[in-house]
Image (cartoon, grey):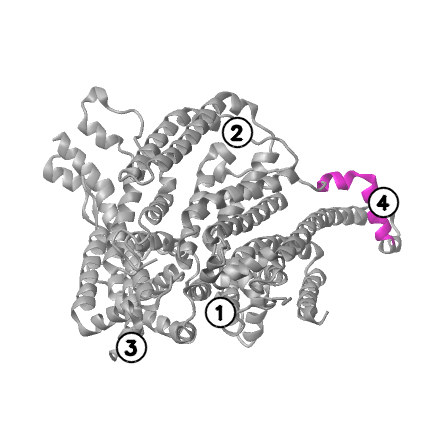
Amino acid sequence: MDFLNAIIVLLNFTIIPALTYGSQLALGAIFVTLIYAVLRFANFATGDMMSFGTMFAVLLTYYLQSKGVSFGILPTALLTIPFAIFMMIFYMLLIDKFVFSYYRIKKSPPVQFAMVSVGVMFVTQAIIRIIIGPTDRRFLDGEKFILKATEFKEMTGLSEGITLKSTQAITIVITLIVVSIMFWFLNKTKTGTSMRAYSDNEDLALLSGIDPKRVVMITWVIAGILATIGGILYGLDKSYRPFVYFNNMLPIFAAAIVGGIGNPFGAFLGGYVIAFAEIFLTYAYKKFITYLVPETLAPDSLLQLLSTDYKFAVSFSILVIVLLIRPSGIFKGKTL
Amino acid sequence: MRNYANVIVAYSIMAVLILLVGIFQSWSIALTILNFCLISAVMTIGANIQWGYAGLINFGIMGYTALGGLAVVLVSVDPVKEAWKVGGLNLILCLWVIILMIFSIRFVLKHFGKHKFKNYGIAAIIVTGIILIRVTAAPGIEAIESVDPAKTGFLGGMGLPVLFSWIVGAFFAAGLAFIVGKIALGLRADYLAIATLLIAEIVVSIIKHEEWLARGVKNVIGLKRPAPYEIDLQTSPWFINLVEKINSGTLSAISSISEKQEVLKQMVINASSIYVKLCFTGLFLTVVIILLILTQKALYSPWGRKMRAIRDNEEAASAMGKNIVKEHLLIFILGSAIVGLAGAMMVTNDGLFTPGSYSPMRYTFVIWVMVIVGGTGNNFGAILGGFVVWFLWVEAAPIALFLINLFTTHLPETNAVKAHLIESAPYFRFLIIGIALLVIMRYRPQGIIPEKIIKQ
């Protein structure tokens, strides 16, 4: 019984949150990695682009709520995803047309692209703050919990309970669906293959008749879908605040590099690696151990490896270690 | 002289802008902006050495700035004897553990460098080291943080003059740069950018959360100053006499004595704050000029030519027998040290150390915009960039407000769009900076004052 309780504690406080957070990071990391693989630069506007898409979801959710529209037990925000994605893709293509395409045609070095993306980052931040403001916003409605701790305790008779928030389930399910569709697209369809060919060797791809403009456009479209969905899921699970999204860029980058930048599957797993590392290293294991060992041995201290203040620092340290030992990432990415 | 025409024009425009602020807003604001411009200029000199001379991208600026600020606290604050008594021993033990760790890792690397299990050995050393540190440090840290937590709760500094800390700040930053350089300099440019950004984030989060070191987010206030305090000035007779003499024209026009006293008092208060700011301006200007002379000399020395050769063609420079790894590390350390110096200057200027305000993400990028806008590889350009961008950053909100009012004059005050725009005027600074960066990158990629190579 105690053993089961210990497992439940771990599941409730580490594994479920880590899976949720990991899914959100994974979507962002695939976004970074796709841009890196096809357009060949590190996009510093990542966090703000995610925030840009989410902003439209938030606004439309508020509008729908004021009109009395709802999605039953599911959050209304899910209804707004197509609109948000549309706005996001429109903005991205606009930015690409007026900013990035110039440097792509000139074949500028990646550093220049990165600096340009910093400029895009500033502009996007300004637009977001001017439209919606910098404050914290919650837009979750519908049923909050799928499973409450007390219900679980009654059902099983254990002394520990599992709380499953609806946002956690939604995040994990939607991420799995979106990512599987994306991998199917990349690996099985003709367009996906042409994208991979373009990413592997641009010149050869051009020779075999692949239209670079189309590849670039499709990349932005896929990236826009991923970024918007990732942003909306994060906002539903926590809350929407532009500055937090901006800061989320760092763990997302860490996930993409740890997984091997340019490798979508690596980025997907990288998201989970980062999330699990962050949560496992900063979780206080006192309760868990107390269930496992006899009473006399129960620990006094919190048994926390690092204080939760260092949550971000953990993911960056992992990144540094990966860069030191295996610079191409855990799952072989592009050459460094 | 003709070569310098654009430099002179650009700097004159900048000077006029600051004078305009002084005339239209107030001299105190103008001097505050000027001081921060000078500090930004030091930072951009540092970033320019790395990016302009050697093509190294360093997004870790805030990490070095924070270390520079930390140096001010550690050097100039008086030591907290009580804290040292209760927890000093544990922390010194900790230091020994760290030194031991470093040496054992070096030993492993030297003797088992080729061995299969090298990495596992190093990991084992680090894990045991961290556990040892946790065990020895925890009681000490707890004891230190409980010593009068509202005022101290940290070890304090060495109680030395604050100007000395500027040098120490540079050395701290140089030390960090050495470690970062060893880890990350082999990476491709954009990876290096991300790696340095993340390492800076780690450094800032350590400074934020280790309260025994510098009170963390509880801030250290009332730091020493290399300039006199306003209160002292307001009571010292020579200063009052000076103010009286300067303003004798206005004062003599006032007939009643009590009114005259009131006006004089107000003038002394204003003048004292301006005097203090002028002292800082003088100090910062000295630093900027010294750095400018040194960096100019370096840029046109054989060393500078070597750096440019490495930047423009690494393989060719390597074939000529230049040690690229070593030179990159050196220039990374030099640039970071200057950024650390700027960090120390900034904290001295503010008089307080607020780790919570070091947001690596935002301010790092602003410094980079300064370098790119001003002119990469040209020190005059970098300094100008520091001035222009900081000026825009501060004055963007008033300018935006003015423009919004101008374009929406036909709308009534109650119009929702107008009210919303006026409310969000501060955020136009991001827009202005972003657009400035994009425009410069597109139409003048070398910056306002481009790099100039003197051919001999």
Q: CA distance from mark 4 to mark 1?
A: 52 Å
- Closer to the camera: disc 4 or disc 1? 1
Mark 1 residue element: helix
Q: Is residue B134 magenta?
A: no
Q: Quadrant of residue B456?
A: bottom right
Residue annotated with mark 1: B438
Residue A300 location (% of width, % of height) = 29, 24
Disc ID at residue A206: 3
Q: CA distance from mark 2 to mark 1?
A: 46 Å
Label 2 or label 1, whichever comes before in sequence order: 2
Label 4 or label 1, whichever comes before in sequence order: 4
Q: CA distance from mark 3 to mark 1?
A: 29 Å
* Frontmost residue, B202 versus B336: B336
Mark 4 residue element: helix
Residue A159: tell me if it is visible: no
User: Numbered disc 4: what chain?
Assistant: B
Residue A290: tell me if it is visible: yes
Residue annotated with mark 2: B155
Q: Residues within 10 Å of mark 3 (few under 14, many from 20)?
A: some
User: Numbered disc 3: what chain?
Assistant: A
Residue annotated with mark 4: B241
Q: Are marks 2 and 1 on the same chain?
A: yes
Main secondary-structure element of the magenta-colored stretch:
helix
Looking at the image, residue A185 lies above or below residue A246: below
Label 4 or label 2, whichever comes before in sequence order: 2
Q: Residues within 10 Å of mark 1 (few under 14, many from 20)?
A: many
Q: CA distance from mark 4 to mark 2?
A: 43 Å
Q: CA distance from mark 3 to mark 2?
A: 64 Å
For the image, the number of numbered tags is: 4
